[in-house]
């Protein structure tokens, strides 16, 4: 956390260029955009570029201005609270180039041959070496999802037809009582077609309530800049499947390095990302049944997950000629909505510290821990103000982000009627976790208040937990880096805020429905984290 904060603090200051080490990363694709002339490619792919993909500076030079030979001569720039991409005095800003470099930095683990496999093998228990410890997933495996689930971009290092990753039990019992190993369990009543078009029931079908009969559909965080589903598979996907005994699907979506999704005029992610997520969600409901689906997401993915349900609830209403169906017959609300550090407010006012004081209060700061050790871990790592302001503009147009009627690009700004429809006779249960060290803390509190108001104050349909974490730390490497690597006597998961966050997630999944949880069967899966990661609170406990 400390080094993340130091790097983000440096990335927020114009004078910080070149303060960090350099990273090596080979080009992933020789001709990444064959349908575009080379002069339109991001500068990182140009052999003559100042910042070739073969060797480039770290995140310190990402913000706030474009790359180029004259970077150091560019005057300091502060973003106006009106949004939009800046133009430097050296050259016009290139959002694809910025995103391409950020994506490359985040994809180091999947760029180096075999490293992804090593990370997955480690998370599965290092061939039995650490298999007995909570946090590992020795009984869980994975497989890539196809393009019907999601879509990768040209720069990602997985297969071009990879739509995400499934995590599921290595072995399970099918509906006929047979043990099946190494295959993805399919929900009851699944039907396949043979080459002649005849339907048949695969031997992977499981009984209702059995392992693999439920699915968590996860939209991973990225800020639309960096990260891919492969990373989040070993960050927490395998762990979550191991603990619950159910299937986890982490979808994929293209990032801002793609010129077709982002230009100097802003981003076009909103419509395509949302439409794809809605289509995949509807298909999962068709296969598993809405009561067996949990829609989840972290950071930017949490905003996409929330927008998906708002879209489904308000616009996928079945219609018959001359018949208007009541709201309670609208299909498709899942059993639960799980949001970790939601990034769901992207309006131009979202980064105004006058409206959201935590943006400035929790912004990264250079801390002298020798003189002030009490300030360790008190600030976020998200770069503010300069870096943060690019992200909303990349995702959607100014109109879509700021509209006050039926807003899906900034779902926190959805109307009270939209939020009400999420809960009206649906039984939807919502869990939100965010950190009290986040710059988005005040934004997330606003969202939680709106959800609670829509569900009814005092209702158990909305559960909110606040942990002592910076933004999205439980998901962005926090579990693997802070829990599994720190083995030995010093490892005290009961004192870890990351472990506490996941303990609360699992508690919500297992809690009785009458008490606000989903009531998942604890005889299926490990659930060992409920015991081993039970939070230990110092007295007096501020929140436990």
Image: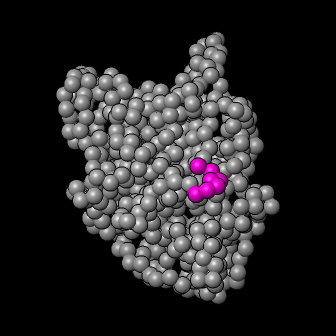
The image quarter in which residue 112 lies:
bottom left
Residue depicted at x 70% and y 81% = 76
- Seen in the picture, residue 92 relative to 277 is either above or below; the reply is below
**Residue 41 visible somewhere in the drawing:** no
Q: Quadrant of residue 328?
A: top right
Residue 363 in view (yes/no): yes
Q: Is residue 297 magenta?
A: no
User: Residue 2, position in %: x, y?
Assistant: 54, 72
Is 4 left, or right, of 238 in this rendering? Answer: right
- Residue in front for this viewpoint, 272 or 329: 329
Q: Position of residue 332 (x, y in %)?
A: 52, 27
- Occupied quadrant, residue 31: bottom left
Examine the rendered structure and indicate whether residue 405 appears above or below residue 76: above
For the record, the magenta segment spans: 538-544
Image x and y of residue 535, in percent: 51, 51
> Count of labels shown?
0
Q: Give the main secondary structure, helix, strand or loop, of the magenta stretch.
A: loop
Q: Residue furthest top?
A: 322
Based on the picture, tell me whether residue 542 belongs to the magenta stretch: yes
Q: Looking at the image, which residue is at 28% across and 27% down?
A: 205
What x and y, as percent, mark residue 242? 34, 44
For residue 416, above or below residue 478: above
Q: Residue at x 20, y 34 (%)?
A: 180
């Amino acid at each position: 956390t400390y080094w993340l904060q130091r790097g983000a603090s440096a990335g927020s200051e114009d004078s910080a260029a070149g303060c960090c080490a350099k990273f090596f990363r080979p080009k992933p694709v020789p001709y990444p955009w064959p349908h575009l002339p080379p002069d339109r490619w991001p500068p990182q792919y140009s052999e003559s570029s100042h910042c070739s993909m073969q060797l480039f500076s770290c995140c310190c030079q990402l913000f706030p201005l474009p790359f180029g030979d004259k970077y150091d001569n560019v005057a300091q720039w502060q973003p106006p609270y009106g949004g939009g991409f800046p133009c430097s005095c050296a050259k016009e800003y290139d959002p694809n180039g910025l995103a391409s470099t950020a994506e490359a930095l985040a994809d180091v683990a999947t760029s180096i041959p075999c490293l992804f496999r090593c990370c997955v093998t480690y998370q599965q228990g290092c061939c039995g070496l650490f298999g007995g410890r909570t946090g590992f997933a020795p009984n869980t495996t994975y497989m890539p999802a196809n393009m019907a689930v999601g879509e990768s971009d040209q720069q990602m290092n997985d297969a071009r037809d990879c739509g995400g990753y499934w995590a599921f039990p290595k072995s399970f019992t099918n509906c006929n009582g047979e043990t099946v190993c190494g295959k993805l369990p399919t929900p009851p009543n699944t039907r396949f077609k043979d080459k002649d078009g005849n339907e048949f029931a695969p031997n992977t079908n499981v009984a209702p309530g059995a392992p693999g009969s439920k699915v968590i559909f996860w939209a991973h965080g990225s800020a639309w800049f960096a990260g891919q589903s492969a990373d989040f598979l070993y960050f927490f996907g395998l762990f979550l499947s191991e603990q619950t005994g159910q299937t986890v699907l982490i979808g994929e979506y293209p990032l801002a390095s793609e010129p077709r999704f982002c230009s100097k005029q802003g981003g076009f992610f909103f419509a395509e990302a949302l439409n794809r997520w809605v289509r995949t969600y509807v298909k999962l409901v068709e296969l598993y049944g809405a009561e067996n689906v949990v829609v989840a997401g972290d950071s930017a993915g949490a905003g996409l997950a929330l927008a998906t349900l708002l879209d489904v609830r308000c616009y996928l209403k079945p219609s018959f000629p001359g018949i208007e169906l009541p709201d309670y017959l609208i299909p498709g609300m899942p059993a639960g909505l799980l949001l970790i550090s939601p990034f769901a407010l992207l309006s131009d006012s979202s980064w105004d510290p006058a409206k959201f004081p935590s943006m400035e209060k929790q912004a990264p700061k250079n801390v002298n821990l020798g003189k002030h050790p009490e300030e360790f871990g008190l600030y976020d790592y998200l770069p503010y103000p300069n870096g943060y302001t690019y992200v909303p503009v990349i995702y959607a147009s100014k109109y879509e982000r700021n509209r006050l009627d039926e807003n899906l690009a900034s779902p926190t700004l959805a109307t009270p009627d939209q939020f009400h429809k999420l809960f009206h006779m649906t039984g939807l249960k919502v869990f939100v976790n965010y950190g009290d060290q986040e710059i988005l803390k005040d934004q997330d509190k606003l969202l939680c208040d709106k959800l609670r108001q829509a569900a009814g104050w005092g209702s158990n349909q909305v559960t909110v937990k606040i942990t002592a974490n910076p933004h999205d730390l439980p998901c962005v490497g926090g579990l693997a880096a802070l829990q599994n690597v720190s083995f030995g006597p010093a490892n005290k998961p009961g004192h870890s805020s990351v472990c506490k966050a996941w303990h609360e997630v699992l508690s919500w999944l297992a809690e009785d429905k009458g008490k606000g949880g989903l009531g998942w069967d604890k005889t299926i899966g490990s659930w060992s984290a409920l015991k081993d990661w039970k939070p230990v609170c110092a007295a007096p406990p501020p929140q436990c």
